[in-house]
Amino acid sequence: MEKKRQFTDYFTEFAERWVPDSYVIALLLTIVAFIMALILTPSNPIQVITAWGNGFWSLLGFAMQMSLVVITGYALATTPICNKVIKRICSRPKKIRTVYIYAVVLSSIGYYLNWGFGLVFSALLCKNLAMQAENNCLKIDYRYLCGAAWTPFYIWHMGLSGSAPLLVATPGHFMVKEIGIIPISQTVFHPYNLILVGISVMAMILLFGFILVPKYEERIISLRQWNDKLVLPECTEVVKKNITTPSEWVTYSPWCSYFIGIMFLVYLYYHFFVLGRSLDINVLNFLFLTLIIWLYGSPAALLKAVKSSTPAAWGVILQFPFYAGIFGIMKFTGLVNIISSWVIAFSTTTTFPAISAILSGFISYFIPSGGSKWIIEAPFLIPAGNALGISNAQTIISYMFGGDLTALIQPFFAVPFMAVCGLEFKDFVGYSFVAFIVLGIIMVLGLTFIPFTI
């Protein structure tokens, strides 16, 4: 008998049929920006193309920064010590409800620390929790467990690797003349952000730990039932090698890495305690490089891990120049000013944060990248907020929340997560879709009614 179709099935089929690859989306958006500039501004085709070309290579530094965020975070999640910690933690839950709550809480911590790290960490967490649950004779639905671990991805931009807050805290960022440097104390660590993040995490715990828990055993599919060939990834330790040459000694022994690692630690001390500076994109990458250098030990082990991590950054490397080109069209043709006036027309001081978040969420479905999308949106969100008396920091926080809500129903970021879990997005998007609705309501109410003070 054919199973009854749910509304989430229709949504998934729509996305598979009509939403193309993210690179193709970048090309289509370039065409849309080109046409809009021709229609809405006095620019002619040559002027629009010139604006596009002037912006195309303007963000290579930022693309490199974001690539390292992905690579270093991914490499950290696969360190031997991280694998051991995951296995130890996952052996503790003794009740079904506790397994799902562990998935939400621990994944939230991983995503908050670094989204690249969190994607792999949460996937490994799912497999370990599922296997330990089976060992403890707990009936766990693997698909639901993965949905519980994926949904906290929503909070990554509000955490330590958030593209927009780290970028505006970095000297020389692309809008430094317009807004200056905004430290993360005014964005990531501002009570406005922290309170709403806390409420969102609590909502996810209630959803996946109590409200949505599968009740019918015949519909529960365990990890082994789903695919008994799924095995936990092995530690990335390099097999011990007989060292016979000086070059092999340098490559396979940790002493060179440890010396460089000490240099990293000294500089971090100088940055935070002598200069008194805060976290930005460069320092975040510096910190994660420090960690993986120390945790992998030998250069050979680190090289192996980084090579495995690099494919996850292909989207950033290829697509960022095209998004920079769109930024060029919007900025140099005056299109950004027109869009800004539209946002102002539909907003008030009270409603602007929520409206800007909703707009950002809509755009993020077609531009699934927190960093590149900020490049496109900042030039019109910031002026619109200023015109309504909204601080730049509050506008950035609104963007942070709206920008990644639709990641719960858009598979771009989930690719490495799915690869490790052995699932397709359609297998768990029904659960994250429910969370998408609930968290969206919380986001709108929170951005509107939680007071913002600097």
Image (cartoon, rainbow, N blue to C red):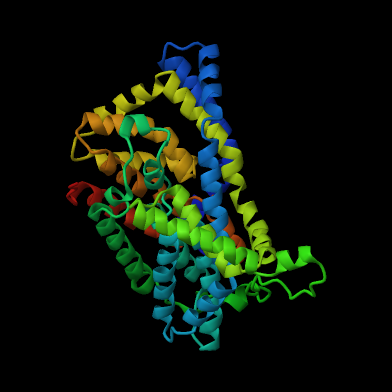
302 or 340, which is in the foreground?
Answer: 302
Residue 151 is left or right of residue 422, and the answer is left
In the picture as drawn, the residue positioned furthest to the right comes out as: 244
304 or 52, which is in the foreground?
Answer: 304
Q: Is residue 138 above or below residue 438?
A: below
x 54%, y 84%: residue:
134
Counting from the top left corner in percent of width and height, residue 196 is at 27, 56
x 46%, y 66%: residue:
149
Residue 353 is left or right of residue 166, and the answer is left
Counting from the top left corner in percent of width and height, residue 438 is at 32, 57
Q: Quadrant of residue 53?
A: top right
23 or 14, which is in the foreground?
Answer: 23
Q: Is residue 78 above or below residue 454?
A: below
x 49%, y 80%: residue:
90
Counting from the top left corner in percent of width and height, residue 56 is at 55, 28
Residue 94 seen in the figure: yes
Position of the N terminus by quadrant: bottom right
Q: Is residue 259 above or below residue 14?
A: below
Q: Quadrant of residue 398?
A: top left
108 or 172, which is in the foreground?
Answer: 172
Residue 124 is left or right of residue 271, and the answer is right
Residue 2 seen in the figure: no
In the picture as drawn, the residue positioned furthest to the bottom comes out as: 136
Numbered-mark total: 0
Counting from the top left corner in percent of width and height, residue 132 is at 53, 83
Q: Quadrant of residue 351?
A: top left
Residue 127 is left or right of residue 180, and the answer is right
